[in-house]
Image (cartoon, grey):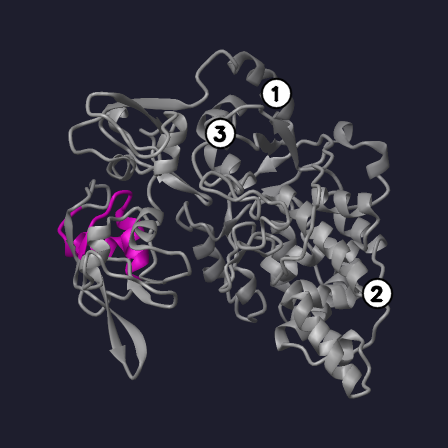
Amino acid sequence: MVISSSQLNPTFPRFRFKRLYIVVASAVLLNACSTVYQPDMEADESTEAANASRILGNRDAATRVSIVPTQEAVEPEMIEFKDIWARIGAGLQFAYKYDNARIDEQLQFYRDNPSYLQTVTERASPFIFEIVEEVERRGLPMELALLPIVESAFNPNAVSPGNSVGLWQIGSSTAPVLGLKRDWWYDGSRDPIASTSAALDYLTTLQQMFDESWLLSLAAYNTGPGNVRKAINKNEVRDRDVDYWSLNLPSITEDFAPKLIALSRLVAEPDHYGMELSDVPNAPAVKLVDVGYQLDLALAASIAGIDSETLYQLNPGYRQWATHPDGPYGLLVPVAVADAFTSALADQRDRPNVTWDRYVVQSGDTLGRIAQKFRTQVGVLQQVNAIEGSRIIAGESLLIPRAYDSTAPIAAPNAPDYIATASRSSAASTVPPQPPARYTVRSGDSLWLIANRYQITVAQLVQWNSLGADALIKPGQQLVLQGDTTLAQTNGQSTIETAQRYTVRPGDSLARIAQRFRITAEDLADWNSIQLGDLIHPGQQLQLPPGDANLN
């Protein structure tokens, strides 16, 4: 998705929530939108079994929630439709207005891959009701409620090659234009509720911009209004039609609307096409609870009586171990626990909501070094300790935020792992994200900014890239961000040559390292004469099997 930086001033009302009991099931692996239309994505049962046993912590994993309706929770106005798909089918406005070969091609794709449609409709179950409610409240075509399937296969953590993220694939540079907050704590582009409001606001603006044509609006949503306007101008100059089907657009944009139209028809009449959809009732699966203050997510899960993984999956907008210090504070929880959670929060107000360590500044310390030591950011230390600038004094104490239950290893799809440590007082609040093997320098970057972003040191960057300490970098330049890889130039193209030994980093596990190098944890353990359950520690050297040391 490409969005121009036109002047928009959207407001984002939160959705309405009703009550219904649900059962939260295990998460399943979900492909990002760039691979949604590959016919072999649901190859066989063994692939699905492998996905079901994925390593928790995979940021590409979407939420899977089964909703079991109960008679007492179903409100009268929801009995009209047998399920959410029937409700969507009844609200279609343009899916049957067009007859084009491109639509037939997309219909055939879905019919050739029946398991795909059943899988993505199941993965939509936690949030689809809220999206339908908002689309209906605005009086928009119900086809738009299915757009997250086309964009991201209903994965709130999907990231495209162009760095668009979330259900609606909103670009990182355009999220602020749409009023979405994005920082170290929170990413509104990944928030299913906030991003839906932003996307629908933008689609409405595009529809007005393109003479109320939803097909042209969808094309503009995908490739940008400027590109659509250029295509229209070219056709006008050549005295050609300027409707969606007549424009010369990028191939992905030419298929964008047909995919949505085909999907809408299948959802409206699955039996007619011999398709089967996941059973998702026309009822809410989650309810938004406004906590009103910063709250540790593991603590929130404990108060709600649900596991932390479920809470993380239902709230992918939160990127760290707690809600944002300055808001938003809303948490989506299963409707079955929402009332009890709200009541329990009232008893929690006088108790600690986040956990802190106290650190005494040592001679030679800097905020950058302390932030790296505790796997946090300089800005967080400045904020919680009311520090302006970077000056700190040896002997003074700093508060270091950390996770509520840092002694219990847990991995979540949208937050770093908690690290098991011998002492809670030395536990870190977060694990730094695994840096990519290579990084392309962007405008405004510096060695310090890049090192701080990926929580490595400038000295490491300088060493790995054979730079001088005062070296200047320029946009487009390629930098190595991992010490166990080197860049080699072959015929003008970069290739990765991986060393045969690996140095364990903070937050690593045998499973994570094995996945990174496309080997099994069992082989990695055997090669190093250790057991699968043995602890590994930062700085430890692990031998990699020859021939298998390829970066994932």
247 left or right of 440?
A: right
Give the answer, above or below, for where 27 lies relative to 33.
Answer: above
Identified by mark 3, the residue type is: Pro
List x then y, in percent, for residue 35.
53, 66
Q: Quadrant of the C terminus?
A: bottom left
In the image, farthest residue toward the bottom: 238
Q: Does residue 392 appear left or right of residue 282 in this picture?
A: left
Q: Which residue is mark 3?
A: 325
Q: Name the disc covering residue 342, or none.
A: 1
Give x and y (percent) for residue 446: 33, 55
Say which residue appears at 70% left-offset and 76% top-offset.
Answer: 230
Q: Looking at the rendered structure, which numbered label has been put on residue 211?
A: 2
Q: Nearer the viewer, mark 3 or mark 1?
A: 3
Q: Amino acid at mark 1?
A: Thr
Kind of residue at badge 2: Asp
Q: Which stretch appears magenta?
A: 502-530
Which element is circle 3 on?
loop
